Amino acid sequence: PDEAAEADADTASGQPAGWVEQLTPGRFAGQTVIVTGAASGIGRAVATRVAREGGRVVAADISKEKLDELAATLTDLPAGAEVIPVAGDISDQGDVERIALAAGNRIDALANVAGIMDDMSAIHEVSDDLWERVLRVNLEGTMRLTRAVVPSMLAAKEGRIVNVASEAGLRGSSAGVAYTASKHAVVGLTKSSAVMYAKSGIRTNAVAPGGVATGIHVPGAAEFGAPVLRPYQGNIPSLAMAEELAASITFLLSKDSVNLNGAIIASDGGWSAV
Ligand code: NAD
């Protein structure tokens, strides 16, 4: 088949050329992994992949309806794998405690994926309400979950925490100050956690996605699945699929990322390299 025709087909499916999600069977067997934001987008792809790779997943999200739908779709899982949906708000301490309780005494890994966008306010326009809401979910929520799982990981002398930052956590922007500040703070939290617990066997890393076709970014994407277009900016694909981010995040959640701690991995197809 000629190359141009193949490239067109990849574009139409939204998949990067030559890539299909390649599961590592049993990678999370016997492990309990909490995934926040699990009801849609990147979190859903992470929860799905961990469960399909044998893990016991505590799937936490504020949207109970979408969580139930996820649990209903995740049938035919390998033996020992499980999805435990817990509806809750990561910015609420009581809800965070319920999420941790559902995981039980031994928590192997935590993926802090839940997050919200802001309304692209500039600093001189930002309202107290928006500022507080975005910081409460993106930063405080990440801190609350981390605080809740660390005692279990300290007792086990091992654990992995993966935070989802953003391109907006790596550089400034002319809009969206609350989101940008919250994601820079997530990077700081990641590095502190990495340093603080390095001797205790707990590794904390972050992934900084570029554009991902999810509900947060492209209205309707969550409903329609893969984007029909995979647009490029110059040489760089500007929109990835959630499964591509899940590939990076599950690697960091797994024991294979053994020598990574405090790393902020840009998973963006090359965007931040330009
Ligand atoms: P999404 O909107 O599809 O998923 C976010 C999920 O988080 C939703 O299911 C939502 O219900 C949940 N959530 C929101 N607030 C919550 C709360 N208070 N408690 C519990 N759950 C809550 O978006 P996504 O693109 O999958 O976003 C996942 C993460 O990736 C976010 O942290 C986002 O900032 C980050 N990110 C996304 C992009 C992108 O282009 N999509 C780029 C960079 C970073």
Image (spheres, rainbow, N blue to C red):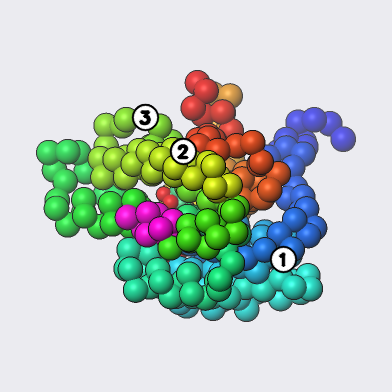
Q: Is mark 1 within 8 Å of ligand 1?
A: no
Alpha carbon distance from label 1 to label 3: 38 Å
Residue 171 numbered tag: 3
Looking at marks 2 and 3 on the same chain, the residue that comes earlier in the sequence is marked by 3
Looking at marks 1 and 3 on the same chain, the residue that comes earlier in the sequence is marked by 1
Q: Amino acid at mark 1?
A: Gly
How many numbered marks does the figure carry?
A: 3
Residue 195 numbered tag: 2
Which residue occupies the foreground of this view, 60 or 97? 97
The stretch in magenta equals 140-147
Position in image of residue 72 (x %, y %): 62, 78
> Does the magenta run of residues contain 190?
no
Alpha carbon distance from label 1 to label 2: 27 Å
Q: What is the residue that sits farthest to the right in this orientation? A: 1
Residue displayed at 32% across by 55% down: 140
Badge 3 element: loop
- Residue 19 vertical placement versus 160 (above, below): above
> Does the magenta run of residues contain 141?
yes
Q: Amino acid at mark 3?
A: Arg
Which residue occupies the foreground of this view, 25 or 125? 25
Badge 1 element: loop
Residue displayed at 78% across by 70% down: 78
Instruction: Identify the image quadrant of the N terminus.
Output: top right
Residue picked out by circle 1: 30
Q: Quadrant of ligand 1?
A: bottom left
Position in image of residue 159 (x %, y %): 58, 53
Frontmost of labels 1 and 2 is 2
Q: Amino acid at mark 2?
A: Val
